[in-house]
Structures are given as C-alpha cells and as structure tokens.
Image (cartoon, grey):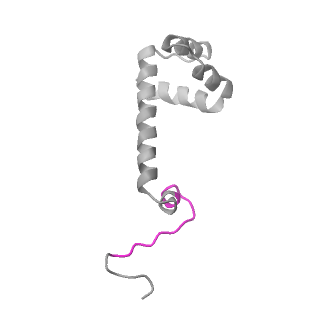
Amino acid sequence: MSEEIIATFMDKFHSDVDFQDKLKSAASPEAAVAIAENAGLKISTEELFNLQDRFKELRNTKDVLKQDLTDQELEFLSGGEATMMCVPPGDSVGG
C-alpha cells in the first residue's frame, strides 16, 4: 500500500464527517471501497484491510502507552507544558 493512498484516505477521513459516517455504516468491505471510490479515492479491498490493521496497531500502541504513562508524562511527551523531574533511585526530592 502506498503512503500516498494512506495519506489521501486519512485526509479525507479526518476532514469529512459525512465520509466517516458512510464508511462506518458500510455493510461490507466492498461497500466501503465503493464509498471511497465515490469520494474520488482509489483503494482496493486489500488496501482497506491493511489500513484497518494499521489503525488497530496504532490504537493498541496508544492504549499501552496510556496504561504505562502518567497523565503528566503523556502531556510532556505530547509537547504540553508539564515538566518532569527525574530522580535517581534512593534519592529524595528537596532533601
């Protein structure tokens, strides 16, 4: 699957709520491909399945990160304003 196809599909998916709704209500993969084609996107059923697999992997990765990191750590990693302080084991803060 080309990165161009993925990028084009994702841009359309994120920017068009009607497109999202139609895809979510598609009765079959073939119907989803037809919806994409009607929106001017060329994607095969196989490419659609590959894209779904990539979404699942990303969602699973995101869920794992959420479980392993505190809210403060997530905010820091996402470029938020939280600050983190690393303290070596056995040391104490402020003392």
Asked if the stretch drawn in magenta spans residue 48, the answer is no
Kindly tell me whether residue 2 is visible in this rendering: no
Residue 80 magenta-highlighted: yes
At x 54%, y 27%, the residue is 8
Q: Which residues are magenta?
A: 75-88
Is residue 61 in view? yes
| Image point (42%, 40%), residue name | 60
Q: Could you tell me which residue is drawn at 45 percent across and 86 percent down?
A: 94
The residue positioned farthest toward the right in the image shown: 18
In the depicted view, which residue is nearer to us: 77 or 26? 26
Residue closest to the far front:
67
* Residue 64 in picture, x, y percent from top left: 41, 47
Q: Residue at x 54, y 66 (%)?
A: 82
Q: Is residue 7 above or below residue 72?
A: above
The quadrant of the image that shows the N terminus is: top left
Q: On the rendered image, what quadrant is the C terminus found in?
A: bottom left
Residue 48 x %, y %: 46, 20
- Left or right of 84 in this view: 35: right
Q: Position of residue 16 (x, y in %)?
A: 66, 28
Against 87, is 58 above or below?
A: above
In the displayed structure, 6 sits above or below 71; it is: above
Asked where in the image residue 58 lies, by quadrant, the reply is top left
The outermost residue toward the bottom is: 95
Relative image position of residue 54 (x, y in whole percent): 42, 32
Location of residue 91 with respect to 43 vertically, above or below: below
